[in-house]
Image: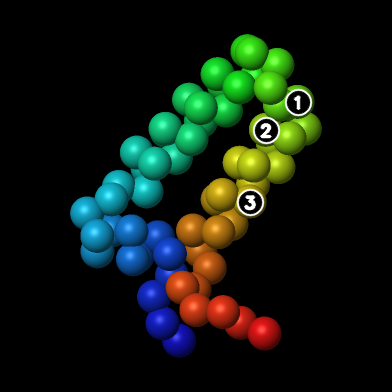
Amino acid sequence: EGDNIREVLQYMQYDPQELNSQLHHSIENALRKKLISHQEASIIKKKYKASLENYTYLVV
């Protein structure tokens, strides 16, 4: 067992909450410009949140 992506981001001085906020802002802009649908926005948010808990190594 190793570190998850959230932990590695914190080690590198990134704030996962701030990154989440920036992503949310980008998604809202894309929705306003009709570049993505609400369904796509939801998928992006879910995948991003789930990815932070994944480990940094490939699991096969």
- Identity of the amino acid at label 3? Lys
The numbered mark at residue 29 is: none
Residue at the image position 77 percent from the left and 32 percent from the top = 39
- Identity of the amino acid at label 2? Ala
Percent x, y of residue 28: 57, 21
Residue at the image position 61 percent from the left and 82 percent from the top = 59
The CA distance from mark 2 to mark 3 is 10 Å
Mark 3 or 1, nearer chain start: 1
Under circle 1, the secondary element is loop
Is residue 7 left or right of 47 when viewed as pictured?
left
The numbered mark at residue 37 is: 1
- Are circles 3 and 1 on residues that touch, CB within 8 Å? no
- Residue for badge 2: 41
**Above/below status of 60 relative to 56:** below
Residue 40 occupies which quadrant of the picture? top right
The numbered mark at residue 47 is: 3
Residue at the image position 70 percent from the left and 16 percent from the top = 34
Residue at the image position 63 percent from the left and 51 percent from the top = 47
**How many C-alpha atoms fall within 10 Å of the one at disc 2: few (<14), some, or many (≥20)?**
some
**Above/below status of 51 relative to 44:** below
**How many C-alpha atoms fall within 10 Å of the one at disc 1: few (<14), some, or many (≥20)?**
few
- In which quadrant will I find the C terminus? bottom right
- Are circles 2 and 1 on residues that touch, CB within 8 Å? yes
